[in-house]
Amino acid sequence: MVTGLRRDFSWLLAQQGGTLAAGMVTGALVNRALGPEGRGVYAELQTWVGLLLALGGLSLESGIRHFANRARYGDDSRARLTTVACVSVSLSLLAALLWGLVARQWPGLLSPQAAALTAVIALLLALSMTSAHLLVLLQSLGLVRQAAWAGIVQTLLGAAAIVVAFERRAIDVEFLALWLAALQAFSLFALAGIAWSRGLGGGAFSPALAAGMFSAGLRQHAATVATFIYTRVNQLIVQHQCGAAEAGLFAVALNLATVAMVLPSTFQTVLYPRVLQADDDFEVTVRSLRLGFYGWGALVLAIALAARPLLLLYAGGQFLGALPLLRVLLVGAWFLPLSSLVAPYCIKAGAFTACSLTAVVLALLSMAANAVLVPRLLGLGAALATSATCCAGFLLALGLLWRVAGRSPLAFLRLPSPWRTAQP
């Protein structure tokens, strides 16, 4: 089992490492092509898509992961694929309709540029949701390596398109929206091809499985929406209260901090099947927390020390105003992934309601902090609110793990054995 975890982590890390490198290149070109104001509009578009994904997806990912446990729910993966596909397509169409309703009924919520792209955003939303659900299913079934290959090819194609568009001076917000939709379409077809090649096609739709996934997802849904609120919605708050240019600075800082979390997020992805299918789930979770707290913390400190050259490389001198925002957000980038390492254990245990209540508390805390800090400190206030909420979230995650497992997880604070002082 440990060998499988290391193998899957290696494959995902190779994919995410390529994604990180390509993202730095494409991000640098996009930031230079758009400038702070255009970057703010692009971030607004991405945030609306993310918010609609969080709202309309009904947290189906949690249900998919929970019901991927073969020991508890059987080994009919073909039925899982058919059921997930049918449910996901239905949800994606409903989410696209919800977006159309928002854009039509409340046009004042959107910038003119985002409002002009309503149809493209609806397409992007539907493709993103369906491909995300399929990816989660394949990863939960252990097809990590195959999904990683699809991600690598997608990354290379996306980076090549941005390079060509930059050379032709064709990068604007409309181009980027179409580009994102094309990448999601490629991902969807590639993942569907992988599933078919592994003999997962042709299964029967299971109403009971669909109902179970819906039920599990809905119990987790408040947590999903609340987590998005306290990590991303402040992008829209800065856009509306401070203008597109300030929103662009915040977007670049937030994106760099998010990119920095590629390593721990990759580890969390491979941790899911390891925890879901094993008996030593609590011990694995504690060891993961220890590795994340010390190992990831050291890397975050190194990133913070190199923040200025990284920002210049990623966005150029016109975005140097984002430097203090980035350093503050890196504090949140340390603690947010640690909280996510608790999620596989809680999902396996079915503690959806407790997860949701915790996330709702954090969302309320975040909104209150943004309401106080953004009018006074602009983008820096949003960064402070985000990092403070992530720190509080880690403490609440530890408390939740303690309650669900009935054991203290604080053993993660003990240094790994090679670092301890030898006992006399």
Image (spheres, rainbow, N blue to C red):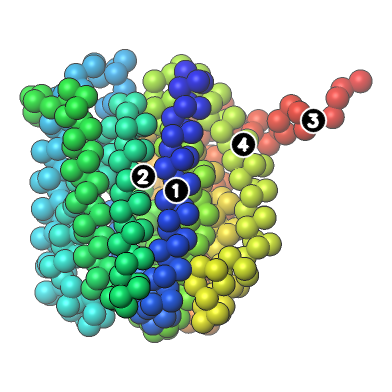
* Quadrant hosting residue 220: top left
Residue 120: x, y in percent?
16, 66
Q: SS at mark 2?
A: helix
Characterize the local packing of mark 2: few (<14), some (14-19) or many (20 or more) Cα atoms within 10 angstroms: some
362 vs 330, nearest the viewer: 330
Tell me whether the residue at label 1 lies in contact with that at label 2, contact meaning CB atoms closer than 8 angstroms.
yes
* Camera sees residue 66: no
Q: Identify the residue at horizontal 18%, vertical 37% (top origin).
A: 192
Q: Which mark is residue 18?
A: 1
Q: SS at mark 1?
A: helix
Tell me the amino acid under the disc marked 3.
Arg
Report the Cα–Cα distance between label 3 and label 1.
35 Å
Characterize the local packing of mark 4: few (<14), some (14-19) or many (20 or more) Cα atoms within 10 angstroms: some
Q: Identify the residue at horizontal 53%, vertical 26% (top origin).
A: 284
Residue 263: x, y in percent?
52, 45
Q: SS at mark 4?
A: helix
Q: Identify the residue at horizontal 51%, vertical 51% (top origin).
A: 261
Tell me the amino acid under the disc marked 1.
Gly
User: In this figure, which residue is indicated by the disc labeled 4?
Assistant: 291
